[in-house]
Amino acid sequence: MSTIAVLPGDGIGPEVTRVALEILRRVRPGDTYVEYPVGGGAYDRFGTPIPDQTKSGVGQSDAVLFGSVGGPQWDGDKVPRDLRPEASLLFLRLHFELFANIRPVRVYPGLEEASTLKPEVVSGLDLVVVRELTGGAYFAQPKEFGERDGVPYALDTILYHKPEIVRIARVAFEMARERRKLVHSVDKQNTLETSRLWRKTVVEVAADYPDVTLQHVLVDNASMQLVRNPRQFDVILTENMFGDILSDESAMLSGSIGNVPSASLGRRGEPGRRFGLYEPISGSAPDIAGQNLANPTAAILSAAMLCRLSLGDSAAAERVERAVEAAIASGARTRDLVRQSEAYLSTTAFGEAVAARL
Ligand code: IPM
Ligand code: MN
């Protein structure tokens, strides 16, 4: 029996998480699910986006099912920087050392037309972004926001240590072994020192994986190649901020950012039974929140990843993934996946279409 911490959060988070949780309960009825507040809603109620009860609940859980955080009411200077909704997610990533962020992007049969790219370019696409999640510009000090000689200025730092690069590179190479044995390491070696270390280190790690082909791509070129010929990619290995950007771009190839799940893993546990946090890669989509319009696919597929990677239950994961595929094949679509004037399903109706095919 496992314990899952459920953190629905803000915006569409609660709607899509509810659907994913219902499906998770169906395939894992013996587990315990405990809900905790997080994000802007938690800030409004408790004065912090990550209350102590949430921290300790997550600490005692085997995995976290996460919705999304943020919204315009907490944007800009409305909330102190370290109390912003996004700070809760960054705290969880850092505190639990969830350094490996895995974002699989697939074009499901039937959704080729939903992409903004030509169907023949994206048809059959199957890639995964392996994003370093606890280093780089997001966390490195110093960070400053101030004024010097009357001129406002701001400063961020990008910092990577070799061991941080080694461990994420290993995740990517191991994953490639189970796939098409190809890793594209993305950096900006022509301008950044951190990228020089990145490339040198990845080359060293690659020596342990002679069966995997390694290619290096500069990040600007990678972003161009992703729309030019995305099927050339199998595993994309990259640092935190590049991964943030390229994963949104990759997700859109699938037809909607609402299709792409993610897993964030650390060292706790063992392979197949690692503690992890699972979330849609999309944001909180405040414009459609509370209207039963959001696409719950990413949340449902995140629950499937949770089964496979934290609960050691590949059978449950496959059941869920097949049900999503079958629902899509049967024509089930949320609003983000249809053309204007075409009929679509609500969030809950899409969830029912998936549940019916489990
Ligand atoms: C993501 C999100 C987060 C990030 C935000 C909400 C801090 O965009 O998970 O991709 O930038 O990592
Ligand atoms: Mn992002």
Image (spheres, helix red, strand yellow):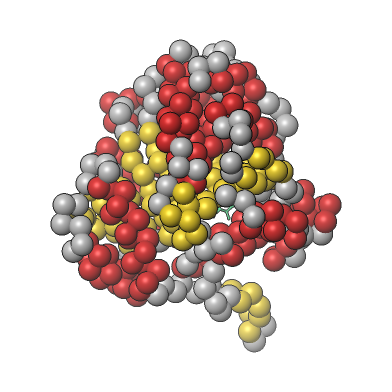
Q: Is 344 drawn above or below residue 310 in the view shown?
A: above
Which of the 4 image quarters holds residue 253? top left
Q: Residue furthest left?
A: 210
Q: Is 327 on the left-hand or right-hand side of 344?
A: left
Residue extending farthest bottom: 149
Along the line of sight, the residue nearer the viewer: 273 or 117: 273
The correct choice, above or below, for 49 with respect to 19 in the image is below
Percent coordinates x, y for residue 57 in the rendering = 69, 53
* Position of the N terminus by quadrant: top right
Q: Kindly give the residue lying farthest to the right in the view shown.
A: 45
Visible residue check, residue 93: yes
Number of labels in the image equals 0
- Residue found at x 38% / y 34%: 106
Where residue 341 appears, as percent x and y from the top left, is 56, 14
At a point 16% along the width and 52% down the height, the residue shown is 211
Task: Residue 101 in the image: state x and y as whole percent.
Answer: 45, 53
Tell me which residue sits at (43%, 31%) in the image.
315
- Quadrant position of residue 287: top right
Query: Residue 84: where, in percent of width, then height?
Result: 70, 59
Residue in front for this viewpoint, 39 or 256 = 39
Which quadrant holds residue 43? bottom right
Residue drawn at (48%, 28%) of the image: 320
Horizontally, residue 288 falls left or right of residue 310, namely: right
- Image height of 102 relative to 346, above or below: below
User: 100 or 153: which is nearer to us?
Assistant: 100
